Image (spheres, rainbow, N blue to C red):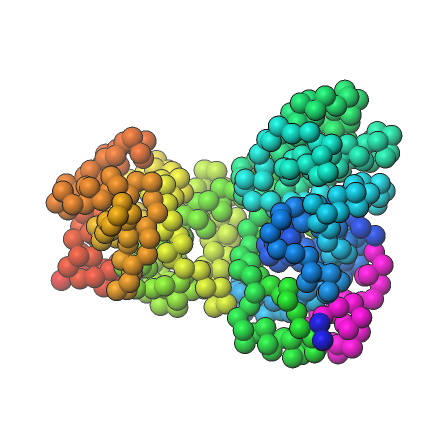
Amino acid sequence: MTLSSYNIKNIIPGTITVPDEDIFELPEKVLQFGTGVFMRGMPDYIIDKANRQGVFNGRIVVVKSTKQGTTTDFNKQDGLYTVCVRGMLNGELIEENVVNSSISRVLTASKEWPQILECAHNQALQVVISNTTEVGIQLVQEDIRQQPPVSFPGKLLAFLYERYHAFNGSERSGLVIVPTELISDNGKKLESIVLELAHLNGLEDDFIEWLETSNRFCNSLVDCMVPGKPDAATQTAIEEELGCKDQLMVLAEAYRLWAIEGDDYVRSVLSFAKADEGVIIEPDIELYRELKLRLLNGAHTLGCAPALLAGYETVNEAMADETFSALISNLLHTELVPAIQDNVNNETAKAFAASVLDRFRNPYIHFNWSKVALQFSTKMKVRCMPVLLQHYKVQEAVPEAFSLCLAAYIQFLRGIRKSDHKYYAKWNGNEFLFEDDMAAGIYKKCQELKPTELVESILGNNGFWSEDLNLLPGFYASVLNHLNSIEQYGVKEVVRALVAKRELV
């Protein structure tokens, strides 16, 4: 038996939250581009949560834009699927299973474009959300009268053009459009592409004015780990309780952030925000981008090399070690948070740092450090170096946890092996492909230079870092000292000594 709107009537509510029948009668208020697990595990979860609370009261029409895969499972399951929420919030373990009923139907753009355009005639429709990956928000010079247009902006423009004519250009027929693609200013970039495409297609001035004045393109920032299906044991246990098979089940972490740039009007339309504290609608969301980049991404990047050198495979495995966990906590609270105080309220930063530690300790999300090491050098530059420089503007004392992590990064780089013009990094007696645009130059330096010269050369790469890090008071000596200690005693002992604030002998 397969999970469906008919079979769900037979499920006895227990540890799984099931929808009330009246939810299936709610109008379609959202058009969503993208069928991926992230959308189902985060935005669609929030909308479903709001519907269950009687707040938003609207369902989602999903557009499948790509040719890969099918909509068979969505059709068989009437758009229903189980979200398994797992993780840590405020130090408490969260386990929640919810049958999500937010999706009313899924339409394939290549086969059902007329039905998708028909949705533009729905007066109840208010919102467009998307996740078409970063390459989705790009200008493709095309005729939007194609059935369908090729690009996501082309499809969106064709849909808005259909809606404009369906409602005779009524101001009230405009939509709130919230892309979740992971690029900066995603809303504004999408808007500029749609407007340029409208001009390229020679669309009338009145429509372009309606496009600009009656629709809201909102920048947004999303942050939630949605790995996909849960492990086999979890899936089997939930299916046994459901009494149904669920081919669309997804695992999502308990932490959620959906920061949306908007005013009171946007807030009134996106009323689902009231149902989840993770949804934040404010005129400026740069604060949340800064927190995510400096504290979450920065701690990930800085912790990567010590973790790999210590033999840890995943983030949660490393955080299960009290000493390593103390290193990351010390890094966050005593070095990274104080260094962004000029831009962010201190209490807000502390609370965010605490949530980062919860997320890193999540026993249900197994995120490999080898993935963090992808483009390691660029991540170190973009995510971490601005905080280091800011630290030295606030105080001259060496940030020792940061210094240790950078020394571990250099030691990690010294272990790179070259073969057939590719580079491989060591981990726990194994190797993985090391993809880093700086790999060739780093490899050459590591082969030719002594540790003293290597540290000076890497820190002094002004062309890459945009600063000579050797000029930061005491930083070169600290990094070199940690590097020598790691080579002599091993990274675990060096971390243990730093956390205990004792000298290595």
Left or right: where 251 falls relative to 302:
right
The residue at 31%/54% (across/down) is 305
The residue at 70%/45% (across/down) is 109
The magenta span reads 3-26
Count of numbered tags: 0
In the rendering, at what x and y percent does residue 116 appear?
A: 77, 44
In the rendering, at what x and y percent does residue 377 appear?
A: 33, 43
Quarter of the image for residue 326 reads bottom left
Let me know if residue 222 is in the magenta part: no
The residue at 41%/48% (across/down) is 298
In the rendering, at what x and y percent does residue 499 appear?
A: 29, 60
Does 282 sit above or below residue 107? above
Left or right: where 459 falls relative to 284:
left
Does 173 sit above or below residue 364? above
In the rendering, at what x and y percent does residue 215 appear?
A: 74, 33
The residue at 67%/23% (across/down) is 200
